[in-house]
Image: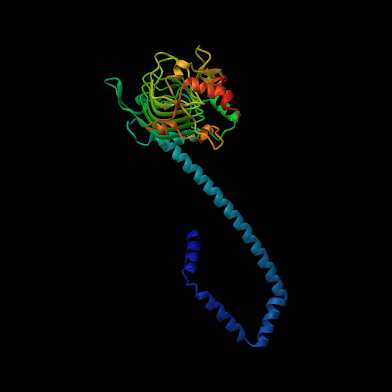
Amino acid sequence: MASRHSTGGQMLSDIPLWVWPLVAALIVVVIFHVPENDLKALNTRFIGGEAAKTIVAIASFVGFLAVVLTFIQIRNDFQDREVERTTRHAEEINKAWDRLLQPTGGNIGKGAALTLVYGAGEIDEELDLSCKAVGSWDSAQGKCGTPPRFHKVTLDHGNRSGDELANAFANAPKGIRLAGAKLRDWKMNWVHFPDADFQGTEIDGIEMRNSLLSGRFDGARFARCDLIQSAIYTFDTPPDLIRCNISGATLNWIENPRAHFLGLRAWADYPPLTFDNEDRIFPTEIYKVPRRIVKIEVLRKISLCTPPTDLHGNPLPLESRQLLADQLDRPCQTMKAEDAMAKYPNAYQFRGSIRDALFKR
């Protein structure tokens, strides 16, 4: 039936536009050539008579019925489209899972698949995306042959309210494993991965905002990273940080002599922090623990960049500043730690938990 309607519509649309005015003119000519007595008889029969009233009533009912049926058809079409959309989305999620868990090394689109399943709320406990699980694992030598690559991943909860974020952080999926994987060009916003496994993970290019990672980072390497107001927590071997922006970042191990970092930067009014409590913290409780600014000995090893200002000389909001990791090839105007502490005293007297800083939205 649909094909006949579409065919009829196509036939009408194929008629040249100049034909319709000609048809209207011919109808007018025919009416003018009908004798006047015949026109009166037609007027009496089809306009003023009882038959005409009956026809009008029937036509009105048919018109109303047509409107109702049209509405029902439109509603059914929308419902069918919604079912198709839901089915198609479910199929996309299933395909993403298949791609994500396929035991193949290299870049085969696992990054896009991870973005999709995370955005759909599909990530659950103990998700294993390590080289051993989804890469090319060399069983004979007991090591990773070709690591899985997760490129251009976006994980974002930035549209949630403060209470929703706090609940999401407290109930975040635990035990995410990315050991031995290669991550590149990631964006994480308001994300919490507690008790995760990043052992031997290479991360090249990551922008973390207001996010928390905790777990094991033995042999992990973060390069070209922006850890803006984010936290990386571990009581094992800390990751290497190479050419990273740690403005407002919380790193419980940065004062540890074993910590290895090179080319770190931070805005002078957003120095890095560490936790007051040096005891082990339960992963889901990290965001509740009080923090303090790192010791001045550590600050002196970091390039503290003078923040950009507005026309009145006030520092621009953090979200309005260019990412420091994008400027690593250019020197920033630095300040000595003592000068920064004197110029931005409030920033260096800060004490508070991640929850206090982040969830008041």
Q: Residue 338: x, y in percent?
A: 49, 19
Q: Residue 83: x, y in percent?
A: 52, 45
Relative vertical location of residue 175 with respect to residue 95 in this rendering, above or below? above
Q: Residue at x 50, y 59 (%)?
A: 2
Relative vertical location of residue 119 with respect to residue 64 in this rendering, above or below? above
Front-lying residue, 182 or 296: 296
Location of residue 66 (image quadrant)? bottom right
Colour option used: rainbow
Relative vertical location of residue 22 with respect to residue 105 in this rendering, above or below? below
Location of residue 347 (image quadrant)? top right
Could you tell whether 38 is left or right of 179 in the image?
right
Front-lying residue, 220 or 282: 220
Front-lying residue, 324 or 229: 324
Q: Quadrant of the C terminus?
A: top right
Could you tell whether 106 is left or right of 339 in the image?
left
Front-lying residue, 280 or 110: 280
Q: Residue 285: x, y in percent?
A: 54, 19
Which residue appears farthest toward the top when viewing the image? 279
Residue 161 visible from this viewpoint: yes
Residue 254 visible from this viewpoint: no
Q: Residue at x 63, y 57 (%)?
A: 68
